[in-house]
Every structure is written in C-alpha cells, then in structure tokens.
Image (cartoon, rainbow, N blue to C red):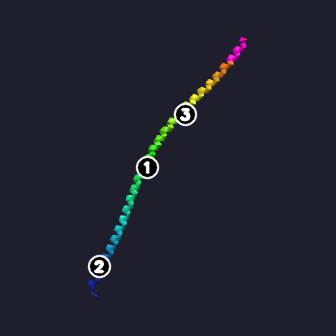
C-alpha cells in the first residue's frame, strides 16, 4: 500500500472523528448554557424572594418595637390602676376610722 493513500485515509478518519468530537462538545456546551440560563433565572427569582422576606422582617421588627412600647404603656396603666385601687382601700379605711371616732 502506498503511504500517501494510508495518510489520506487516516486524515479523513481523523477529520470525521474531530467533526464528531466538535459536535459532541458543542452539544455539551449548549446543555451547559441552557442550565446556566435556568440557574440564572432561579437566582433572580430567589433574589426577589429574599428582598421580599427582608422587607417583611424589617416591617415585623418595627411592629414588634411598637408592640413593646404599647406593652410598656399598658403595664404602666395597670400599675397605676393597682395604685388607685390601693388608694380607694385606704380611703375607705380612713372613712371607717373617721366614722368610728366621730361617734
């Protein structure tokens, strides 16, 4: 066999193999690009969700702070109410004592 013929045949086989390898490589790159596009969309959606959650947490923090302030006011009111009840008791006792000593 002639060496040129062998080299030409091998070159054709090699070119066919390289063409197939390039197609396979391009197919894999295409799949990776599709996956990357999908992941990018998911990441954008998660970023939006995270922003919403962050805003909700901030609003909840404000609400909790308001609730704490309201609770302190209610506690103060309840303490004053208890003090008024004690004052009423003392006034009644004093009134009884005044009534008893007036006799």
For disc 3, the marked residue is 71
Crowd rating for badge 2 (residues with CA inside 10 Å; few <14, some 14–19, many 20+)? few
- Residue 34 colored in magenta in the image: no
User: Residue 38 in the image: x percent, y percent?
Assistant: 39, 58
Numbered disc 3: secondary structure? helix
Numbered disc 2: secondary structure? helix
Disc 3 to disc 1, how far (Cα)? 32 Å
Disc 2 to disc 3, how far (Cα)? 86 Å
User: Residue 2 in the image: x percent, y percent?
Assistant: 27, 86
Would you say 70 lies left or right of 29 here?
right
Q: Is residue 89 above or below residue 73?
A: above
Numbered disc 1: secondary structure? helix
User: Residue 32 in the image: x percent, y percent?
Assistant: 38, 63
Who comes first in sequence, dot 3 or dot 1? 1
Name the front one of labels 2 and 3.
Answer: 3
Question: Where on the picture, by quarter, is residue 36?
Answer: bottom left
Q: Is residue 59 above or below residue 3?
A: above
Point out the stretch of residues depicted in magenta.
94-102
Q: Which disc number belongs to residue 12?
A: 2
- Residue 99 colored in magenta in the image: yes
Question: Where on the picture, by quarter, is residue 41?
Answer: bottom left
- Quarter placement of the C terminus: top right
Who comes first in sequence, dot 2 or dot 3? 2
For disc 1, the marked residue is 49
Question: Where on the picture, by quarter, is residue 16?
Answer: bottom left
């Amino acid at each position: 066999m002639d060496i040129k013929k062998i080299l030409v045949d091998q070159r054709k086989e090699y070119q066919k193999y390289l063409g197939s390898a390039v197609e396979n490589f391009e197919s894999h790159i295409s799949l990776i690009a599709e996956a990357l596009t999908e992941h990018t969309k998911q990441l954008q959606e998660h970023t939006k969700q995270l922003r919403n959650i962050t805003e909700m947490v901030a609003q909840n923090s404000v609400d909790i702070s308001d609730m704490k302030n309201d609770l302190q006011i209610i506690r103060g009111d309840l303490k004053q109410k208890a003090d008024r009840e004690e004052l009423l008791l003392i006034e009644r006792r004093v009134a009884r004592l005044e009534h008893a000593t007036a006799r």
